[in-house]
């Protein structure tokens, strides 16, 4: 059998790397000092007598200040998050106990029994705590009332209400966390209501009278009060004293809040909004610097995370694939990834196509050229940026190098018996890749085998959801292998690389 492979972010979580949301939070916590130095070094290497410096860069570029994104970008991030993930936010907060239990389990591994602390201080069992009879949103926001039924959130409210439980230095932070959670819930509910109203202001109207079409959005949501307090707090939060009861409770609240924000944050608008400034440094120098330094910081963070990854994990997705190849279980046509780390190639020992760029792939906006840093600057030094957000910048997609990589991968997948996908979400931002998979399934009749962590759904249910995301007609061509954290197929004792051979 001959297989093509595609790996997404989920394939690297097992190596100790952060998930997408955690990745976003950590990026904004990074110190940009070193990235600014790296940017200045590139700037200083530019020959000021070249046409590039004369026409592409501002006249006094060597003396101009260099800045990076600050807190002002938080509002845009929250706005994008609330706009595009409003339903997910409400669902996440309505299932507050699920997040809280995972956080409590994490603390338990650190020797902190947060549940025991809260039950002892409140003199109540947590499962006997609910606030839904005491607190409720207005009827228009009734969908969010489930939050108050959650035991852990009820405990937080009662702990805050009892002024003697939290220490004086912890109480203001604890208050900020509760407020942030409520603001995020209200923001998501308000966005939904605002859209319903703006989309249907008139119960009746004459479509031929175009003045009605020019009214626009009458009601606007105040995004600055929809979660920015929580975002700012997560950027600057201090580590509490975990030896005290108050500190243990605050630590639990911080862990829960970080998980909530990490699961809903949507920062793609930051890239989408600022990417085009890479093409206008002469007129938008400050914004050009900010997006460049941001991308350099992202690269630095990814490299730092990869350096701490445990690449020896025998049950890691890449390690299992390597073993299967070495054992001659099957042939491989092409391996592709949407991740930016290059250690996949080191582990598997085969050429890998980096469909979203990588830490070792650089982009020259001036020439619309992609390659290694040394090769791009071999003839003449330019200001380059790491290419790691291909889907957010349409122009890099038109680079012949990237086009060839996509076409070559597609052609090799066409020559496979099936394409195996692991850790990939088939999201709307991945349509440049979804389109390839859709063509392989519907036009070429190829099978898509998706390796997915078991979360309670059956293989058939997962296949149906994936088919809906890919918008394919041949859903029967999608097969799912459900696995546990060790890569073992649920209900068996075999790894997913062996399960592939059992799919006909």
Image (cartoon, rainbow, N blue to C red):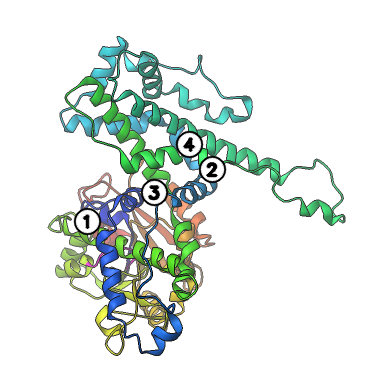
Measuring 87% from the left and 54% from the top, which residue is drawn there? Answer: 209
- In terms of depth relative to the viewer, which is nearer, 291 or 50? 50
- As measured in the structure, the alpha-carbon distance from the residue carrying label 3 to the one carrying label 4 is 34 Å
- In terms of depth relative to the viewer, which is nearer, 133 or 66? 66
Give the residue number, with chain letter if any, for mark 1: 305
Cβ–Cβ under 8 Å for marks 1 and 4: no
Crowdedness of circle 4 by 10 Å Cα count: few (<14), some, many (20+)? many
- As measured in the structure, the alpha-carbon distance from the residue carrying label 1 to the one carrying label 4 is 29 Å
The earlier-in-sequence mark between 2 and 3 is 2
Q: Position of residue 344 (x, y in %)?
A: 22, 66
Crowdedness of circle 1 by 10 Å Cα count: few (<14), some, many (20+)? some
Q: Secondary structure at mark 1?
A: helix
Residue 223, numbered circle: 2
The earlier-in-sequence mark between 1 and 2 is 2
Could you tell me if residue 481 is visible in this image? Answer: yes
Q: Position of residue 450 (x, y in %)?
A: 36, 57
The earlier-in-sequence mark between 2 and 4 is 4
Q: Secondary structure at mark 2?
A: helix
Residue 466, numbered circle: none
Tell me if residue 217 comes above or below residue 165 in the rendering: below
Q: Position of residue 38 (x, y in %)?
A: 26, 69
Q: Which residues are magenta?
A: 337-342
Main secondary-structure element of the magenta-colored stretch: loop
Give the residue number, with chain letter if any, for mark 3: 459
- Give the quarter of the image for residue 150: top left
Give the residue number, with chain letter if any, for mark 4: 184
- As measured in the structure, the alpha-carbon distance from the residue carrying label 1 to the one carrying label 2 is 32 Å
């Amino acid at each position: 059998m001959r297989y093509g492979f595609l790996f997404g972010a989920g394939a690297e979580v097992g190596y100790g790397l952060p998930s997408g949301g955690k990745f976003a939070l950590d990026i904004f916590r990074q110190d940009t000092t070193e990235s600014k130095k790296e940017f200045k070094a590139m700037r200083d290497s530019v020959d000021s007598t070249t046409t590039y410096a004369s026409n592409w860069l501002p006249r006094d570029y060597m003396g101009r200040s260099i800045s990076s994104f600050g807190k002002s970008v938080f509002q845009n991030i929250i706005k994008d998050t609330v706009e595009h993930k409003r339903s997910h936010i409400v669902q996440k907060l309505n299932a507050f106990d699920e997040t809280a239990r995972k956080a409590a389990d994490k603390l338990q591994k650190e020797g902190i029994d947060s549940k025991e602390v809260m039950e002892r201080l409140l003199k109540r069992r947590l499962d006997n705590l609910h606030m839904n009879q005491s607190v409720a949103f207005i009827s228009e926001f009734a969908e969010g009332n489930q939050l108050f039924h959650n035991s852990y959130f009820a405990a937080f409210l009662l702990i805050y209400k009892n002024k003697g439980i939290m220490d004086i230095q912890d109480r203001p932070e604890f208050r900020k966390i509760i407020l942030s959670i409520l603001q995020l819930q209200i923001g998501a509910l308000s966005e939904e209501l605002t859209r319903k109203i703006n989309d249907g202001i008139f119960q009746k109207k004459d479509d031929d009278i175009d003045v009605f079409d020019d009214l626009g959005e009458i009601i606007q949501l105040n995004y600055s009060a929809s979660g920015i307090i929580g975002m700012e707090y997560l950027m600057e939060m201090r580590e509490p004293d975990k030896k005290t009861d108050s500190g243990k409770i605050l630590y639990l609240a911080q862990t829960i809040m970080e998980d909530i924000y990490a699961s809903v944050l949507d920062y793609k608008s930051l890239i989408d909004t600022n990417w085009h400034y890479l093409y206008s440094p002469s007129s938008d120098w400050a914004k050009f610097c900010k997006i460049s330094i941001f991308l350099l910081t992202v690269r630095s963070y990814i490299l730092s995370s990869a350096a701490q990854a445990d690449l020896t994990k025998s049950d890691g997705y890449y390690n299992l694939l390597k073993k299967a190849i070495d054992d001659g279980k099957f042939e491989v046509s092409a391996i592709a990834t949407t991740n930016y780390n290059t250690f996949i190639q080191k582990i598997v020992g085969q050429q890998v196509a980096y469909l979203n760029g990588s830490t070792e792939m650089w982009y020259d906006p001036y020439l619309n050229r992609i390659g290694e840093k040394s090769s791009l600057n071999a003839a003449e030094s330019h200001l380059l940026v790491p290419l790691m957000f291909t889907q957010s910048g349409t122009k890099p997609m038109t680079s012949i190098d990237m086009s060839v990589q996509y076409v070559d991968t597609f052609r090799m997948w066409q020559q496979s018996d099936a394409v195996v996908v692991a850790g990939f979400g088939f999201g709307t931002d991945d349509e440049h890749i979804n389109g390839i998979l859709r063509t392989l399934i519907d036009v070429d009749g190829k099978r898509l085998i998706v390796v997915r962590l078991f979360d309670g759904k059956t293989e058939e249910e997962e296949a149906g959801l994936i088919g809906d995301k890919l918008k394919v007609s041949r859903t029967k061509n999608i097969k799912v292998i459900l696995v546990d954290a060790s890569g073992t197929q649920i209900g068996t004792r075999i790894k997913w690389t062996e399960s592939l051979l059992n799919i006909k």
